[in-house]
Amino acid sequence: MTFFDEDALLAGIGREVEALASDALRRHRLPEDQFAFVLLTGPGPGGRPRGAALRPAMGFYPCSLVKVFHLVACQAWLEQGRIIDHPDLDRAMRDMILWSSNTATNYVIDLVTGTTGDTLLGDEEMARWKDRRQAFNRFFLAWNWPELAGLNLDQKLMDDQRYGRERASLGPDGAGHNRLSAGAVARLMYAVFHGDILPGPRAAVVRDHLARDLDSPHRPRAAYQVNGYLAAGLPAGSQVWSKAGRTRWIGDDNANFRRHDTIRAILPAGQEFFLTTMSAGEAINEDDGFLPSVAALVADRLAG
C-alpha cells in the first residue's frame, strides 16, 4: 500500500514521463531501469495525496537528497533541546540546502550524532562511533513509514574518496553508502508541507531553506541547483522549493554518476505538485536537458 491514492490524470502523465525517460536512457545506451520517479498533487477528498510512480521503492545512492532528512532531524533535535542553536549551525543548515555544501552538512552530522570523522579508531571505540552515527537512521525508522525500509543515512557527504573511519564505516566491500528511494524522499518532501512531522515553526524553517527563486541572480551557478534540474523546466512565475543531488566520477562505482531532484512547485495558475526523480548512469548524469524536460512535461499537462 502506498501513501498516496492513484489518480487517472497523474497515471497518464506518469506514463508519458516513463516514455520520455526510457527514450533518453536508450539514447544514452543505459538500462531503462536506472530511473525512478514519484509525482504527487495535493490532498484528495480523503486527505491523502494523489499520485503516480515508477520504481518508487528502488534504492539509490541518494547524493545530496539526504540533506533534507538531515535538516528535518536537526530541527527535531533543536526542538527537543538535544543540541543548542548557534550562528554556525544556522549557517550550516542554510548552506547545506541552498548551496548543497558538503562541509556544512558534515558539521550538522557531527552535531546531531556526536561524532567526528577521519582517523581510524580501535575496535571498541569504532563500534561506539558507528552506533552514534546511527542516530539519523533510528530517528526516521521510528516513524514506521514503509517507504523508509532499507534507508541508510549514516554516512557523511564527500566530494571524492573516503579515508580512515569514514572509509571503514562503509564495510569491507565499500557498499555501506547512504541509501534512499524515490518513495522515501517524496513522502518526506510532501510531509514537510502537508504533514505534522515537526512543530509548525520548525517545519517553516525547513520550508524556508528549501525555497528557490527562479529569477535569482544565483540561478546560473551550478550550486544553486536550478539550471539542469527540475526547476529549470517550469514556466516563469512558478514558485519552487527543491533539493537536488549529483555525483560525477568520484572513484567509487557504488556512488558514481547519480543525478536526483525533489521539488514542490506551484504553477502560475495555482496548481501544486511534488516531483521526485532519481537516475543513474554517466550519460544521463551529463544530460542537462533531461530533468528540465521531465518537469516541463508535468507542468504542461497539469496546467491543462
Image (cartoon, rainbow, N blue to C red):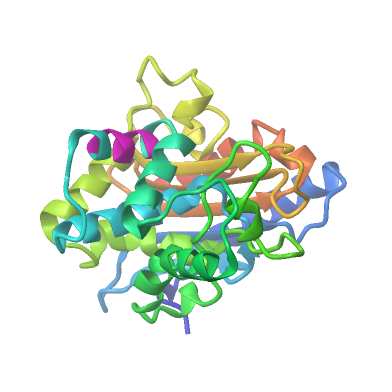
Residue 200 % position (x, y) = 12, 57
Give the residue at the far right of this rendering. Answer: 29
Pick the residue in front: 121 or 3. Answer: 121
Residue 283 % position (x, y) = 78, 38
Q: Answer above or below: position of 126 versus 302.
A: below
Instruction: Please state if 61 lies on the left or on the right of 9 as rendered.
Output: right
Q: Answer above or below: position of 181 versus 31.
A: below
Instruction: Please state if 87 lies on the left or on the right of 265 as rendered.
Output: left
Residue 294 % position (x, y) = 58, 44
Q: Residue at x 48, y 74 (%)?
A: 147
Provide the major secondary structure of the magenta segment: helix
Residue 246 quadrant? top right
Number of numbered discs visible in the structure rendering: 0
Q: Residue at x 35, y 20 (%)?
A: 216
Give the residue at the far top of this rendering. Answer: 217
Q: Is residue 111 visible?
A: yes
| Residue 47 shown in magenta | no
Highlighted range, magenta: 90-96
| Residue 94 shown in magenta | yes
Give the residue at the far bottom of this rendering. Answer: 1
Residue 192 quadrant? bottom left
Pick the residue in front: 225 or 120. Answer: 120
Residue 228 % position (x, y) = 58, 31
Pick the residue in front: 84 or 18. Answer: 84
Q: Is residue 52 visible?
A: no
Q: Residue at x 77, y 64 (%)?
A: 173
Instruction: Please state if 252 lies on the left or on the right of 137 as rendered.
Output: right
